[in-house]
Amino acid sequence: MADYKAPLRDMRFVLNEVFEADKLWASLAGLQGAVDTETAEAILETCGQIASEVLAPLNRNGDEVGSTWKDGEVTAAPGFKEAYQTYVEAGLNGLGGNPDFGGMGMPKTLVGQVEEMVQGANMSFGLAPMLTAGACLSLNYHGSQELKEKYLPNMYSGVWAGAMDLTEPHAGTDLGIIRTKAEPNADGSYNVTGTKIFITWGEHDMAENIIHLVLAKLPDAPAGPKGISLFLVPKFLVNEDGSLGERNAMGCGSIEHKMGIKGSATCVMNFDGAKGWLVGEENKGLACMFTMMNYERLGVGIQGIGAAEASYQNAVAYARERLQSRAPTGAVAKDKVADPIIVHPDVRRMLMTMRAFNEGGRAFSTYVAKWLDIAKFSDNSEDQQHADAMLALLTPVAKALLTDNALESAIAGQQVFGGHGFIREWGQEQYVRDIRITQIYEGTNGIQALDLIGRKIAGNNGAFYKLFEADINAFIATQAGNDAMAEFIEPLKAALENLNDLTQWVMDQAKNNPNEIGASSVEYLHVFGLTALAYMWAKMAAVALPKTGEEAFYKAKVGTARFFMKRLLPRYIGLTAAVRGGAEPLYELEEEMFETA
Ligand SMILES: Cc1cc2nc3c(=O)[nH]c(=O)nc-3n(C[C@H](O)[C@H](O)[C@H](O)COP(=O)(O)OP(=O)(O)OC[C@H]3O[C@@H](n4cnc5c(N)ncnc54)[C@H](O)[C@@H]3O)c2cc1C
């Protein structure tokens, strides 16, 4: 059965050595006195223990038994309710929350590591705190003081949970066409009516109340995305004194049967004139939701890394024990009937690919989290603007790149097990099924790619892109004259030059053909992503190279950096050629010619 150990050594390396988190935190006005290396270490340790000992053992059970629905009530899989209690009692639920309302105000660079451990141990469980954190974030930024005082403290403490209700049967990517209505009442509240589908943990028994953030349209709203408003709709109405009142006019009609994350309830939510309160301004709901979605998009990327790390750990253990055939260079385990499969080049390729994507992804998600921290906690408006631009650019990359790589990793982790990888008992196939959703929800990866090249690059004529390029060039400059680093810096430089040219090429093509952006987007995102990972691996190599004599960890880090540069980074060459193939081949067929029978 699959096992999970929190990768604390690597998290410490990324936080303390690569990004020098203590210096970053000390430099940010809004974090003064809130966190230091010691506090961070204590939080990581606590979470690591809960992830490995409490959440991971429930992962299989969640998959096998799942949540159950009866007469509108959802019961979480056995053990989930107790695990949730352990998790919230350890204070992990409100880690990133606003201290004015009971949150702990911790930086995302740290919270991201905690999220990775929780998701790595049990993705289905991890979705519950993730959605609550996202709902809190939106409420904290856009809600009135009254709403914040009434709801945030209980949400941060985990007594109440949160859910996010956007999708409708006919409206997923295009939220501008939703039909849920909100009609104003004389007392300032609204009556919300409509049906939402696919609502993660929309109903469950782990918390006393569930606070839904629901997108709906006012009676006189303009058509399209500019006519959407955001409403807070609690499962139980909350009395003036904070106690729970009557049940709101809403309920869970059913839960979905699905491919993965079976431990989480995916709910159809019916609102029948449920009482709700406006969050933010009328018709500005989409902007409010994006506050939550940007946070969650990075969170979904982190989910991918977490689960792929778990798959990697099990694949390594198996590859060291499973005996099949002899090494091409001659028998290694001479006293055994065959060698452990880790001796074979192809098994090595799979393990190294997983490792390079997971560790590179961990560094990249921490890099993106660094910009989130600067945007949130700096008191320098120029730095904040810079960080906001970097975040806008990098968030779709973090979501799509890390989840696409996570699926590749998990499939490799399954393949290492041969036929046993296909069998339930070993747990490797669950990671493949669970990770698959990360490419779909929170905006499909296709939509992330479109957002990157369309809105975030072509939309401002490459202004945000130039900041990213400058950041990489500044790092490259710090390595000038360092001959030992040339093996990492030269491929990084080549990848960056290629990306610069390709970015300009796509923007030029798009001026003549509106389809060019969409046609190039997915491959372009991966060329961008591979370049970003090359930057991360060069950064990590720069820290690890001088320390290879100190600890095997650093030697492994440098070895993995070499593998990335030589075996994974060159993928950008083929992807670049595909982008340059242009949009025309996609439109060779008339629509009816797609029929094959
Ligand atoms: C398990 C699960 C949990 C979920 N949790 C939640 C939740 O908690 N809350 C919530 O509100 N929603 C949730 N969702 C919904 C999820 O976010 C949507 O399914 C997703 O955004 C895609 O929407 P859709 O399914 O309607 O697909 P569609 O929008 O119909 O898209 C179908 C395909 O067309 C592509 N496409 C659509 N428009 C374009 C375009 N303009 N250009 C290029 N390609 C395009 C898409 O990329 C996709 O490949 C969940 C879904 C699942 C399956």
Image: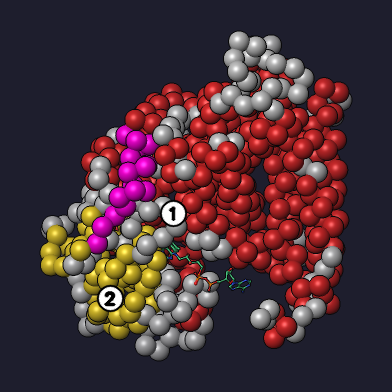
Residue nearer the viewer, 596 or 171:
596
CA–CA distance between discs 2 and 1?
Answer: 27 Å
| Point 37% across, 42% down: residue | 59
**Could one spot residue 502 in this view of the protein?**
no
Which quadrant of the structure image shows residue 505?
bottom right
- Looking at the picture, how far across and down is residue 30, in whole percent? 47, 42
Q: Is residue 396 left or right of residue 144?
A: right
**Could one spot residue 203 in this view of the protein?**
yes
| Point 65% across, 56% down: residue | 393
- Looking at the picture, how far across and down is residue 365, in whole percent? 58, 43
Look at the image and give the residue range highlighted in magenta: 54-69
User: Is 411 located above or below residue 443 in the figure?
Assistant: above
| Point 49% across, 72% down: residue | 172
What label sits on residue 466 in the rendered view? Answer: none
Q: Earlier in the sequence, mark 2 or mark 1?
A: 1
Q: Amino acid at mark 1?
A: Gly
Query: Any magenta on residue 60?
Result: yes
Q: Is residue 246 left or right of residue 25?
A: left
User: Is 418 located above or below residue 397 in the figure?
Assistant: above
- Looking at the picture, how far across and down is residue 269, in whole percent? 31, 70
Q: Is residue 448 left or right of residue 133?
A: right
| Point 81% across, 60% down: residue | 578
- What secondary structure characterizes most of the magenta part? helix
Q: What residue is disc 2 on? A: 271
What label sits on residue 260 in the rendered view? Answer: 1
Ligand 1 under 8 Å from disc 1 Cβ? no
Q: Amino acid at mark 2?
A: Phe
Q: Nearer the viewer, mark 2 or mark 1?
A: 1
Regarding mark 1 in the picture, which secondary structure is present there? loop
